Every structure is written in structure tokens, then in C-alpha cells.
Amino acid sequence: MVISDKKYDVIVVGAGHAGCEAALAAARMGAKTLVLTMNIDSVAQMSCNPAIGGIAKGHIVREIDALGGEMAKVTDRTGIQFRMLNTSKGPAVWAPRAQCDKKIYAMTMKQILEAQENLDLKQGEVKEILVSGNSVEGVVTNIQTLYYTKAVIITTGTFLNGLIHIGEVTFGGGRAGDKPAIGLSDCLLKLGFEIKRLKTGTPPRLNGKSIDFSKLDPQHGDENPVPFSFQTEKITQEQLPCHLTFTGEETHKIIRENLHRSPLYSGKIQSHGPRYCPSIEDKVNKFADKERHQIFLEPEGRYTHEYYVNGLSTSFPQDVQVNIVRSIQGLENAELMRFGYAIEYDFCPPTQLKVTLETKNVENLYLAGQINGTSGYEEAACQGLMAGINTVLKLRKKDPFILGRSEAYIGVLIDDLVTNGTEEPYRMFTSRAEHRLLLRQDNADKRLLGYGYELGLISKGQHKKFSEKQKTIGEWIQKICSERYQQLPLDQYLRRSEVRIKDVLGILHEEIGDTEVASQVEIEIKYSGYVQREIGMVNRMRQYEEKKIPSNLEFRQIRALSKEAQEKLDKVKPLSLGQASRISGVTPCDISVLAVYIEKLRRLG
């Protein structure tokens, strides 16, 4: 065995979206960091859809940016189409989404990692986590290299014992074209972790030269695209169109006649797949009343003819995939460049984690991304960022960084995972957040940029620019609230549904040069009543969040608790009454018993 002559504070296993954010955060906070990846040419690869953002996911990306992460900035640099979704609805559910050039995105992120101070990027497959006592000591790679470290963050995506299915054909792989990670799951089992299986999938890719675009509906980006990053002044690159088509009666007939050949229905795949991103065979079978399903053709890059077929995820055999594709309008002569597939992989149920994403079994071992049962680049990236931050804080013996459910979608996601776990790939939605009016994508900097600055991930210049923006917004709000129109306070006039900020500025005969400032002024005034009610609700719930539960409390000794509550509380080990109240199976009566017991302990001393 070869022992590396360099010792690290943090080693990140995997260089996907979680691994990149974890490594950059740790290195930027001053920790000597190493990233080990099975293929150094696949850093930040977009294995599925080459897109960032969307409903709730876009909120997460802007939160990552406000905290000093990298995903938003790289998206702005490499995006080929930008759209703000849901603008016909209230601002709480507006969501940015961008189609990216997948190769340039990955290359750009790799360059950022390579250039980052305190960060080494090396190729190597981690086979074993070394533990001394109950704490991480190092990792061993497939070529028997030992790296010593103080902490490890595992971000292995779908690679742990990955198994790919295309019809009757099955082979090992972390994704098509890459081998699986074998051995690390066994190591985790030996360390006492529970391991389960999940499934996800991807659609075929088509050669754009074989697509008849004249039969498709073009879908263009926004005329004035909103950047993802608060640091990006403007999106200037040319945007490319996507195209819309639909499945039809012939498509559905082919699918129904071949269901027995799908691994999902033949019994070959036993694990749970993503509920909210089902395969086309699942959609046709479970929604038999639907006459058609949307199919979006999305370019994979600016310099390739390859198209991603969004909405056609499948694991059918190759011949069936060809027939399905060619039954769709505009794709009658389409050539498949890559076939769709399903992939099964190992994950660790996330109730085995603390809210910092450190494992309960092994000290200084953190898990982030799809190994925790999530789906999507954005969900992975935010976990990586939080794991990187908390790893360094713990090594420095500082308090952990924990975001509440009323502070960020990131807080909602982590609380959901560690409190109730997941039996299927977890995907973020705005409906998961009880305080979503406070968690808008447009105010992520107001909510979180101060934290990023305190952590050393946001520069003084960025913080100064943010402070000046907030000051300008406050001055405009004060000005509008002090004026009247038609015997009404001008702010009340702006709250009318048909009135916009441009109408108010016309009355004042003034302009706000910054469109982002103007939008913030309008939203904050228009929805101030709703926001204040939401803040009141958060304050009422805060008493439960602030009521801490002693870390050494023996729940099974509290006989007044139900047996189910004892078991669930002992498994999750919640930090507060608020977290305890969100555990499935723990009743309000159990919470009352727990509150009385904790108060009794406090009085006794």
C-alpha cells in the first residue's frame, strides 16, 4: 500500500454536483481539501437532463448562490436557454430554469475546482473508509493508495453498486459509459449503516439532423432572462429554442403491447423509482385516460446535434424504444444516438444522519446527494454545500450551521430527510415548504447572503453590493408608503391586483433603474400583509424549535410515550420539540408528554 505524503482536513468522495459544492465550500473556508473521483473527465457531469432549476429547484440554486456556492454562476455562464416559470401565478412559486450546454458546464466547473486554492482534484475510486475508534481516519483507493484525513464527505450519486437495465440487458454501471463503484457499500455495511436500493432512469437522445422541426412547436427562452446568480449582471449569450411535441394513440399502443418487456413490469427491477418523474411506460399504464403526454426536445449543447427527449424516460428494449420514438410527430425518422435506461443503486436511508449531514454511526463522516435518497442536481448540490460548511465548522470546534424550515428550502429538504427519511427518490417542491411565501427565489440573498458572508464564502465586495441594494429597496418602499394617490396611501394603491410598480412610478414621475430592485419593491409592498401573517406563524412555532431536547435523553425510559413514539424518537434523535413533532408516528399527545418531561429535567437541574 502507498501512503500519500499529503494529509488533508477533508476528503470528498465523488465529483458530481454535491461533491463539487462540498469541496469548494471546504477549501474556501480554509480547509486542505482533496476530491477523489473515479473519472476526472466526468466532473459535474449532467447524467440526465442538461438543465438547472425549475419549480422549487430554482429556489434552491439561488439559495446556494446566496450562501457562496458555485452552481448558479456556472449556469449563467453556460446556459443556452433561460426561462422564469410560473409567472402567471404568485411570486412565491416563480422559478428560474436554464437549459445548459452539458459539456461546457462540466468543463467550467472542473476548471473552477482545479484553480481553487486549498483544493486538490485526483482520479481514484475509494474502496474503504478507515475508522479509528469511532472517527474517520482516512480512505483507501482501488490502487491501494491511503490518504489520511480528519473528515470524509461521501457524494457517490448513483454509482454504489449501480446496475443498468435496457430491456432484457443488464450490466453494472454508475451511469451509461461509466463503471459502478463496488466495495464502498460493503464498507458502509461493516461500519453499521443500513443500505437500501433506489431506481431512476433517463430517456433516449436523438440526432437533431433526423428530427423534422417543422412539425414541432418551438419553445423560446425569455426575451430578458433573469440570471441565476445575484452576482451576474446580465445574460448576454444567444439562446437556443427547445421544441414541443406529444405522444399519441400509436405510441401508447406500442407501450401497452410491450409492457411485459419492460424491466419495471417484468419483475427485474424491485426498487422504488421517482414518483414525480415516472417513465413513459409508467405514465401510459397508470394514467390510461390520458390521450397524450408532452415531450420536450431539448438541445444538449451549443456545439452538438444531440437532443434530450424530456418526458420519455424508459428502460424498454432497444427495438421498442426505436418504435416508440418514431411513433411521435416530428420524430418519424429519428435516429437514436443513445438509448434510455433505468439504473438501480445503493443509498443510505437519511435518518442515519444528524441535521448537519454527519452520520450518527461514525464521527466526521458526512453523506450528501443521491446517497441520501434525493434526486436532482440541485438537491444534491445544496447538500454538498451544507456538508462542506459543517465539516469545516466541526473541525474548528464551532457551532454547526443549520437552516430552519422558515429560512430556506435547503432547511426544508434536510429536515425532511433526517426526520422522516425517504423510500423513493426525494424531489423538492414548493408544496413541501409550509412558509413558501417567505422562501421566494427573488429574496434568497436577503434571507441567506449574510450567512454566506459570516462563513467566509461571500466576499466583502459582494456583501457591500447586497447592502446597497437592500438600502435602495428600503428607501423606495419608504417613499411609496409616504405618498398618496386618489386619497389613498400609494402603497395601498399598489396592493391592488391590477396595479403594477410601473403605474406607481408613473404617478411619481420617477424611475427605478434596476429592474431587480423595482421587482423587490413591488413584491414587498404588494404582499406585505401575507408576509407579516406568515412571520407571525413562524414566531408562534419558534417556541417548539427553540425547545431543545437533551442529546442523551433515553426516550424508551419515558413510559407515558407510545411505543411507536419511543422507537421513532430513539431512531431519529431529534434536536428540538419542533423536529420531534414532524416525525411520522409521533402524536401531539406524545409531544405534550415530551415537553413536560423535558421541563421536569430542567427544574431538577
Image: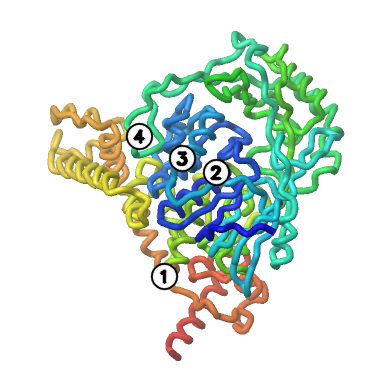
| Residue to which mark 1 is pinned | 546
Q: What kind of element bears circle 4?
A: loop
Q: Amino acid at mark 1?
A: Glu
In the rendering, at what x and y percent does residue 211 appear?
65, 13
Picture disc at residue 67: none
Label 2 crowd (10 A; few <14 / some 14-19 / many >=20): many
In the picture of the structure, the residue carrying the numbered disc 3 is 112
Mark 2 and mark 4 in contact? Answer it, CB < 8 Å.
no
Q: Earlier in the sequence, mark 2 or mark 3?
A: 2
Give the residue pinned by disc 4.
232
How far across and down, in percent of the image, does residue 222 sit? 42, 24
Residue contact between numbered discs 3 and 1, judged by CB atoms under 8 Å:
no
Residues 286 and 191: in front is 191
Identify the element where label 1 is drawn. Answer: helix
Mark pair 2, 1: CA separation:
33 Å
The earlier-in-sequence mark between 2 and 4 is 2
Residue at 47% from the left image edge and 66% from the top image edge: 395
